[in-house]
Image (cartoon, rainbow, N blue to C red):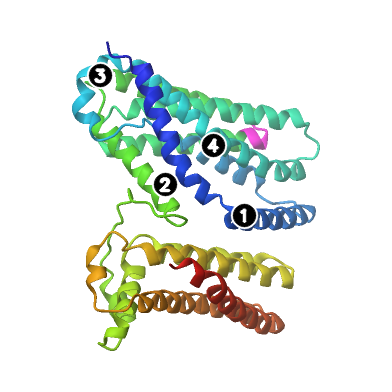
Amino acid sequence: MFNSHEFFKKRFSAHLKETGRYLKYIFNGHTAIAMLFFISALAYYYQQWLIEIPENFPTSFIIGAGFGLLVSYSPIRTLLKEPDLVFLIAAENKMSAYFRNALIYSFVIQLYLILLVSAAFGPLYFATFPDRAGNVYLLTIAVVFIFKIWNLVTNWWMLKVREPGVRRVDLGVRTLLNMAVFYFLINGDMVYAGITTALFIIIFLYDYNVSRKQAGIVWDVLVEKDRNRMQTFYRIANMFADVPHLKNPIKKRGWLVSLVSKLPFTRKHTFDYLYRITFVRSGDYLGMYVRLIIIGGLAIYFIPNLWMKIIFAILFLYLSCFQMMTLYQHHRTIMWLDLYPVESSIRQKAVVKLLFQLTFLQAVLFSLLFLVMQAYLGFVIALAAGIAFNYLFINGYVKRKLV
């Protein structure tokens, strides 16, 4: 006798084992220290900024938009796999307990986002509305939980609709209504908050009516969405450890490949060529590198203290170099690399050279940002410290790990 509740427990246990294996690498000592420093610095300057917050600052709009987007983003984790398309469709009428557990699990794993966003917005809320009692904000958080549940259930109903355009329109309308509800709620316009809540309930009931008219569960859509989320997790985990399940997308980027692959046609440049085009075309290396430069540049630009700017520049150099180290293992499953008539030491030297070139370029860009801000002393210190850090970190740590 098929028991979908027991089946979910087995699937959930396997999922926890799979993700836990990579989470211990993601939150290792290096990452934990960097995140702790980053969050502590942001919290300090956030508190300093709140002391001088402008009177006309759009707090209601920012918090309302943040909470609205938070409750609208309510993905359903079904933990389904491709073989289920064959073996579970016949038991669809017995899967109610499984999908009920999946909804509960999806809600629970998203609670941390509510807590983090609520904690981040709390100081801004009380700095803007000092005359309001604390229980008013707690009531707002309770409303966030309620809307989170409503949106989660609505998303589940809409997953029974095969047309992606219909689902996108529904999500767009609900997102606007969610943002409007929390904007009016934060702003103290309870009448308008009630009206927009009533409109949301109408959409909620309409979606329920639409889902009832559907023939059944759209299994292929559920499997595809869960597979995409796991691939996203694997891409993040691949920054810290080898992930054999990862399906790396290959992007052409011909103009960029032609730009970085101008090397002499000699044996000693074999791996230089390979890792350059791997960085440009494979996985998410290029995107991650650019994102770290942008985020680091924003941190350097907005943090007022010169020495903290320099520390953040070094921190993001470290993060970039640490994440790009996975390039060395990128082709580990490809046999023909071992057939190259090239010494293995040349492979390591190619990765080390590429890492130094990437972090050197990043150090230069961060230093030029100091020139834009007319912090000439910061330019000199950031450039010298960045180059020195790259040399010491790559020669002292990276080389030992690339084995």
Q: State which tag comes first along the sequence, 2 or 4.
A: 4
Q: State which tag comes first along the sequence, 2 or 1.
A: 1
For marks 2 and 1, give the CA distance.
18 Å
For marks 1 and 4, give the CA distance.
33 Å
For marks 2 and 4, give the CA distance.
32 Å
- Determine which residue is flagged by label 3: 92
Instruction: Name which residue lies at 67% across and 57% down.
Output: 37
Neighbours of disc 1 within 10 Å: few (<14), some (14-19), many (20+): some
Disc number for residue 35: 1
Mark toward the viewer: 2 or 4: 2
In the displayed structure, 208 sits above or below 345; it is: above
In the displayed structure, 386 sits above or below 91; it is: below
Q: State which tag comes first along the sequence, 1 or 3.
A: 1
Question: Which span of residues is magenta-colored?
Answer: 185-189
In the displayed structure, 380 sits above or below 35; it is: below
In the displayed structure, 92 sits above or below 339; it is: above
